[in-house]
Amino acid sequence: MKQTMLALLIAFFSQLLIISNGISTSQFFLQQINSENKYLTKEEQWFNQTLDHFSPYDHRTFGQRYYEFLDHFRIPDGPIFLKICGESACSGIPNDYLSVLAKKFGAAVVSLEHRYYGKSTPFKSLTTGNLKYLSSKQALFDLAAFRNFYQESLNVKLNRSNIENPWFFFGTSYSGALSAWFRLKFPHLTCGSLASSAVVQAVYSFSEFDKQVGESAGPECKTTLQEITKLVEARLASNPKDVKSLFGADELRNDGDFLYFVADAAVTAFQYGSPDKLCIPLLEAKKSGADLVNAYATYVKDYYVKTFGVSVKTYDQENLKNTVVNGDTSDRLWWFQVCTEVAYFQVAPMNDSIRSSKVDTRYHLDLCRNVFGAGIYPDVDATNLYYGGTKIAGSKIVFTNGSQDPWRHASKQTSSPELPSYIISCHNCGHGTDMRGCPQSPLVPEGDAKNCSSPDAVRRVREKIVEHIDLWLSQCQVSGRSSM
């Protein structure tokens, strides 16, 4: 509490220093310590969250982690930007394009870790029974409860009451969907939302995903990837131990898990803005007559695993059964959400697929049953009925997608005045390009777009985002409420 108050005071006096000196001491200090830092802050704060928002009898709570960054906050009436953390541990507030927006609008930035992920776990064991409170619906109520808690605590620190700062919500991917859904379900608590690469449509058999990978790869690279899949399947049938060892995936005893791993490694190049790291060496190997499977295995081990940081055990169903709470539980948690709410089963299309046809709907359903038990399957119809899918009927939500991102086919890509939607088109524009720049991973400080093949395409969409935020915040301030 003392540190928070100190930060508020520093932010307040920084405003005075800006007037007299042009740049504040705190901003200069911030620039120094974060010049090579990927986070605006990693200082943990805690909030007591309700476990079950839908029960009038269950009053259990758990500790939920959050972060706040106040260096750009224009006291006392600046906006509050809430960055939603999604399906992984939340280690701080990333220094992405949101930091640029916070500086522009004089906003405080807060970020809430998703229930169950990271340190925000309600239970000591992640059994299927204990996961019953892990859902997007509970997560939305978490955000609403936290939003009101933070507003009230800010009012106390500023010695005032019944004052509402204008709020704006941000999210990317699943958290982008949460951002859109929050505005839909709680329009009185936010002026608007940015839904970046927001997967708002639950999809049972998501064949469009693989089709987009092929389009993003281009004809030559696509054909080469298809050839590699056939060669891998043939080796898997004749000598499974050797081919799995070649990819450094000996632990994947289930052949379906291995083929999913092989397919996902290619997806990452297009999803996160590094297509040339995959396609250039493969096409060179093709032209020189080199062993294509060896060339692809080298990419998988050197880039996907070593550089990108993916662990092979992520794909191991035996690992997904682990119910121990430790620092590596996100995979089990996300698969539970997949297997109960949204599916997004990335299946091979009937024709012209890149991934193996063995990665089909049956593979996914078997995984859900094997990992979580009988009776666990995704009710996508109920999810889309509740939120509207791509026919979401909210207002003041801006949707953005990268042209090369296979996830965009689960997002809203049609635009309207109340729900503007933009596609950022370029060779390496993927998942969350508007917030992350290029490549989308690893993090580019402040979401710098200079390495995008078309920085202007990113700039134009960002200008639209700023226009929408500016308009919707001003409408909030006129109404004197967080929303209208």
Image: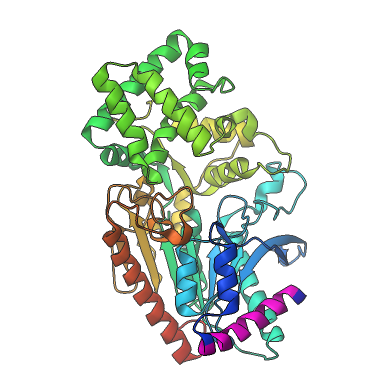
Quarter of the figure with residue 61: bottom right
Residue 258 position (above or below residue 142) = above
Toward the viewer: 145 or 157? 157
* Picture residue at 49% right of the left edge, 68% below the top: 99
80 falls in the magenta region? no
Spot occupied by residue 17 in the image (x, y as percentages of width and height): 57, 86
Q: Among all residues in the image, which is located at the extreme left?
A: 219
Residue 123 position (above or below residue 103) = above
Toward the viewer: 326 or 441? 441
Magenta stretch secondary structure, dominant: helix
Quadrant of the snapshot with the N terminus: bottom right
* Picture residue at 59% right of the left edge, 43% below the top: 336
Quadrant of the snapshot with the C terminus: bottom left
Position of residue 39 in the picture relative to residue 465 (left or right) = right
Magenta stretch in the rendered image = 3-20
Spot occupied by residue 314 in the image (x, y as percentages of width and height): 57, 34
Toward the viewer: 364 or 32? 32
How has the structure been colored for display?
rainbow
Residue 288 position (above or below residue 34) = above
Residue 418 position (above or below residue 478) = above
Spot occupied by residue 370 in the image (x, y as percentages of width and height): 60, 30
* Picture residue at 51% right of the left edge, 89% below the top: 19
Q: Among all residues in the image, which is located at the extreme front?
A: 21
* Picture residue at 44% right of the left edge, 33% below the top: 265
Spot occupied by residue 189 in the image (x, y as percentages of width and height): 54, 77
Quarter of the figure with residue 388: bottom left
Q: Is residue 52 visible?
A: no
Number of marks: 0
Toward the viewer: 103 or 61? 103
13 falls in the magenta region? yes
